[in-house]
Image: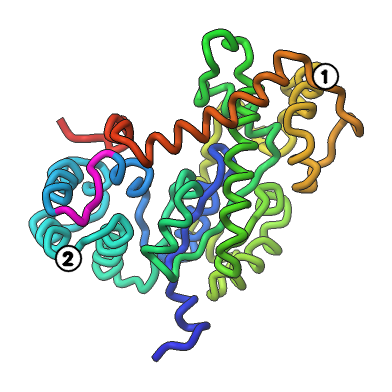
Amino acid sequence: MPNDTTRRARSPVFVVGSARSGTTLLYHLLLSSGSFVNYRGEPAVFDLMLPKFGDPARRRNRERLMDVWLQSAMYRISGLDGNSIRDKVLSQCRSAGGFLQLVMGEIAKLQGKERWAVWGPDNLLYMEQIKKEIPDALFIHMIRDGRDVALSMSKELWIRPFPWDRTQNLVTAALHWEWKVTTGIQSGQSHLPDYLEVNFEDLIMRPSDAIVKISRFIGQELDYDQILDRSVGTISSPNTSFQEECQAGMFQPIGRWRRELSDAQVKTLESAIGPLLKELGYELTVPETDALAFRHRMMRQLYPRYFGIKQWLKVNTVLGSLVSLDRMQLSR
């Protein structure tokens, strides 16, 4: 019977966090180590397929899931035989975690690997369920300065404010970062020692130290030189909302908010999310943040509740079945 160290060295690793926090970078770092299944996609099992198709314990739901999954990019990049994986899912799968383990396990066999990892920022919201269905799961929570995250997310318009706040993209994005990070930290603390927080800035500025920390956590030594030599995905080509920096040879992902935001915008952001920034070890430009304007106080009260209610409805009601399938990139 494998001991705890051996078991940990084979445990699946879930890379989670707020959007634009470096989750893709960390996932590709793991892939570049050569120790994990090379799956260049997002399985999106818990946050998309489960609410869309329902509990896999019901055979009809498994059939609906496979009818669509076999048309998806998730299947196309897997290298698996469609008929074989369909038969195995229909006969063996009884949960979302079981589906993920089965699919990734089959890809691991195909590639001759003993271990797999999952990229999926929103899995941060499903850690409790994942841990219940995949007990040996390990979670690495990537955390980045919320000011840089808000700047990047507002540029992409990923988190849309209510119509009456349409000029407040930056604050809305910052509040979403705060809600996501806080939710992840609170959930993660209940899963220690199988939960680790890694700062994006540490991974960029002190990669060797960060990799040692990650290696200890996952129970497997990662070779930094080998990672650089393989350079999968964003290790060699940054995944950024600021491609103009790459084109100009001036890619600087840390502290971009200092260059891009006005003093007034920074003050507003720090007034909105300053306490969490400070708790996470980020320095504020204004030691004592000013009181929020009435509008932003109302946003601070409203948006976290809205994000939480929206997530609850997605998980617990039929509204989850309305989730878009765009991320699956279905073949025509």
In the visual, does 64 lie left or right of 180?
Answer: left
Looking at the rendering, the stretch of residues picked out in magenta corresponds to 52-58
Residue at figure coordinates x 62%, y 10% from the top left: 167
What residue is pinned by disc 1? 263
What's the amino acid at mark 2? Gln
Q: Which quadrant holds the C terminus? A: top left
Q: Position of residue 178 (x, y in %)?
A: 65, 37
Residue at horizontal 40%, vertical 34%?
A: 313
Residue 159 sits above or below residue 318 on the image: above
**Residue depicted at 48% across the width and 46% down the height:** 125
Q: Nearer the viewer, residue 283 or 114?
A: 283
How far across and down, in percent of the image, does residue 30 sit?
A: 49, 60
| Residue at 48 percent of width and 55 percent of height | 127
Image-based side of 113 in relation to 110, left or right: right
Disc 1, SS: helix
Residue 152 appears in the figure: yes
Question: Circle 2 sits on which residue?
Answer: 92
